[in-house]
Structures are given as C-alpha cells and as structure tokens.
Image (cartoon, helix red, strand yellow):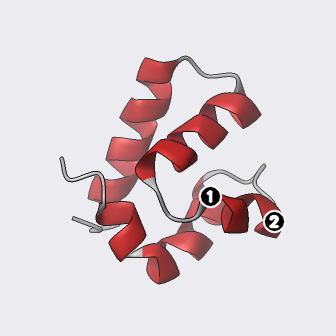
Amino acid sequence: MNKDIIKGNWKIAKSKIQQQWGKFTNDDVEKMKGTYEELKGHIQKKYGYEKERAEKELEEFIKNNKLQ
C-alpha cells in the first residue's frame, strides 16, 4: 500500500477521519499533517490500540473511503 495516499487525499480525508475516529479534535487532525504514520500513531495513542490493530483500521478506512 502506498502510504502517501493519506497525504495526497488529505482535504477529503480530514472530515472522514473525525467521523471514523470521533475522539479526534480538529487540532488533533491538523497536527497529523496527512501522513500515514502520524495518523496511525494518533489512533494508537487516542484509542490505546496496538500497532497491528491501528494499521488494520487505517487500511480499512483507506479502502472504504476510496482513498487509494
């Protein structure tokens, strides 16, 4: 998977990220800077997920929102 997909679709993804992961504030989303690794790290931190679960959710999010 191309990990730059999030960054390339950041304008579209920002609102969908907050819908998917409701614990994120606008400030949280702005700090992520559109990178896959930043988003994955924030998911892990906010939700207490292990790396594998955060990756799985993020990959499903990308696929379900046609960000590929």
Vertical position of residue 63 compared to residue 53: above or below: below
* Residue at the spot of label 2: 27
Q: Give left or right: position of 32 versus 56.
A: right
Above or below, 51 relative to 46: above
Q: Is residue 14 left or right of residue 10?
A: right
Q: Amino acid at mark 1?
A: Met
Disc nearer the start of the sequence (2/1): 2
- Which disc, if any, is residue 63? none
Which x, y percent locates residue 9? 38, 76
**Residue displayed at 27% across by 55% down:** 63
The answer to which image quadrant residue 14 occupies is: bottom right
Measure the alpha-carbon separation of dots 2 and 1: 9 Å
CB within 8 Å, label 2 to label 1: no
Residue under the point 30% across and 63% down? 5
Decide if residue 20 is on the left or right side of residue 1.
right
Report which residue position mark 1 lands on. Answer: 32
Q: Does 51 sit above or below residue 45?
A: above
Residue 66 drawn at (x, y percent): 27, 68
Residue 59 vs residue 64, the one in the foreground: 59
The C terminus: image quadrant? bottom left
Residue at left offset 46%, top offset 56%: 35
Left or right placement of residue 6 versus residue 15 in this view: left
What is the quadrant of residue 57 in the picture? Answer: top left
Question: What SS does tag 1 mark?
Answer: helix
What amino acid is found at the position of numbered circle 2 in the picture?
Asp
Residue 32 picture location, percent across and down: 62, 58
Count of picture labels: 2
Secondary element type, mark 2: helix
**Number of residues whose C-alpha sits closer than 10 Å to that of mark 1, classed few (under 14), some (14–19) or many (20 or more):** some
Which is more toward the observer, 27 or 63?
Answer: 27
Q: Residue at point 47% right, 43% down?
A: 37
Q: Residues within 10 Å of mark 2 (few under 14, many from 20)?
A: few
